[in-house]
């Protein structure tokens, strides 16, 4: 294999650490495209002993009542960015933090995309909650219906993208060192929505937004940004 190719891919992976989400995502996708064309895996570019596996929180907190969709969202995004999600329960509280396990480059982009997706859902939910004439419980159901719909729309968009670029399947896999770490952890689970509590119009709205979600055209930022940089569902 030409060292020119591997060096080019290495440079692209370095760009994936960019603080600018569009540049980072574009660089990572281009790197994966080249890896697929030349049948290379991440381990072929950087030796496993030089790749650092990150296991770290995204700074997003969630509850089963206010944002039950947040864990499924992390599972969908993690799978698409060669990472695995996990949840960390906070002792004595009903909230948990969501994190990812992955190679450093993958983790940085995965975290970035996840936080933007979470913020996008919370932005729409903030608008939904402004409606008058509904109880707090009904408004919460509307918001969660939107969140579940967004997850399914995003999953459909990822599946369509994979179908259009089947060669990406060669490299968009969970690296073995990452999977080894995950195998030693407790499996993350998430609640499934009850059809009785779903509002179909909001599910459909979320689905449509999830399908067209693009981190390079970020929806207005909302959610509560705390002093520690954590995003909380509210």
Image: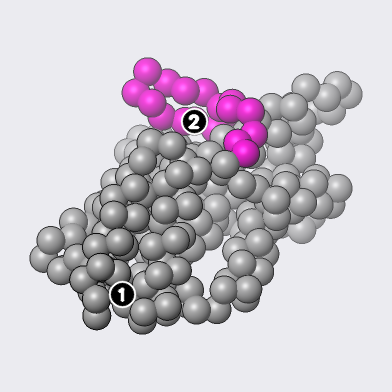
Q: Residue at x 13, y 61 (%)?
A: 50
| Location of the N terminus (image quadrant) | bottom left
Q: Residue at x 63, y 28 (%)?
A: 220
Q: Distance from label 1 to label 2 (Cα)? A: 36 Å
Residues packed near mark 2 inside 10 Å, few (<14), some (14 to 19) or many (20 plus): many
Instruction: Name the main secondary structure of what is drawn in magenta.
Output: loop
In the displayed orientation, state which residue is furthest to the top: 227
Q: Secondary structure at mark 2?
A: strand
Q: Residue 59: x percent and y percent?
A: 38, 36
Q: Is residue 124 above or below residue 89?
A: above
Q: Residue at x 15, y 69 (%)?
A: 47
Q: Is residue 81 above or below residue 2?
A: above
Q: Nearer the viewer, residue 161 or 26?
A: 26
Q: Is residue 41 above or below residue 107?
A: below
Q: Residue at x 25, y 68 (%)?
A: 4
Q: Is residue 164 visible?
A: yes
Judging by the rendered image, the residue that carries numbered circle 1 is 41
Q: Is residue 198 visible?
A: no
Question: Which span of residues is magenta-colored?
Answer: 217-234
Judging by the rendered image, the residue that carries numbered circle 2 is 232
Residues packed near mark 1 inside 10 Å, few (<14), some (14 to 19) or many (20 plus): some
Q: Residue 188: x percent and y percent?
A: 41, 59
């Amino acid at each position: 294999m030409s060292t020119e190719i591997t060096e080019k891919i290495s440079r692209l992976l370095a760009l994936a650490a960019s603080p600018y989400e569009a540049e980072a995502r574009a660089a990572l996708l281009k790197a994966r495209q080249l890896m697929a064309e030349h049948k290379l895996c991440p381990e072929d570019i950087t030796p496993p002993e030089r790749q650092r596996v990150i296991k770290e929180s995204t700074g997003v907190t969630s509850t089963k009542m206010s944002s039950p969709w947040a864990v499924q969202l992390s599972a969908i995004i993690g799978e698409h960015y060669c990472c695995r999600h996990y949840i960390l329960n906070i002792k004595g509280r009903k909230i948990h933090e969501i994190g990812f396990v992955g190679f450093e480059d993958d983790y940085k982009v995965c975290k970035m995309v996840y936080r933007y997706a979470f913020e996008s859902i919370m932005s729409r939910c903030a608008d939904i909650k402004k409606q008058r004439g509904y109880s707090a419980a009904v408004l919460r159901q509307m918001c969660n219906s939107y969140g579940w719909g967004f997850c399914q729309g995003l999953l459909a968009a990822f599946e369509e993208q994979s179908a259009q670029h089947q060669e990406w399947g060669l490299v968009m896999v969970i690296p073995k060192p990452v999977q080894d770490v995950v195998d030693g952890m407790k499996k993350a689970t998430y609640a499934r929505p009850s059809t009785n509590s779903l509002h179909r119009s909001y599910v459909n709205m979320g689905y449509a937004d999830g399908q067209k979600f693009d981190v390079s055209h970020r929806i207005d930022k909302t959610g509560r940004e705390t002093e520690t940089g954590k995003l909380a569902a509210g």
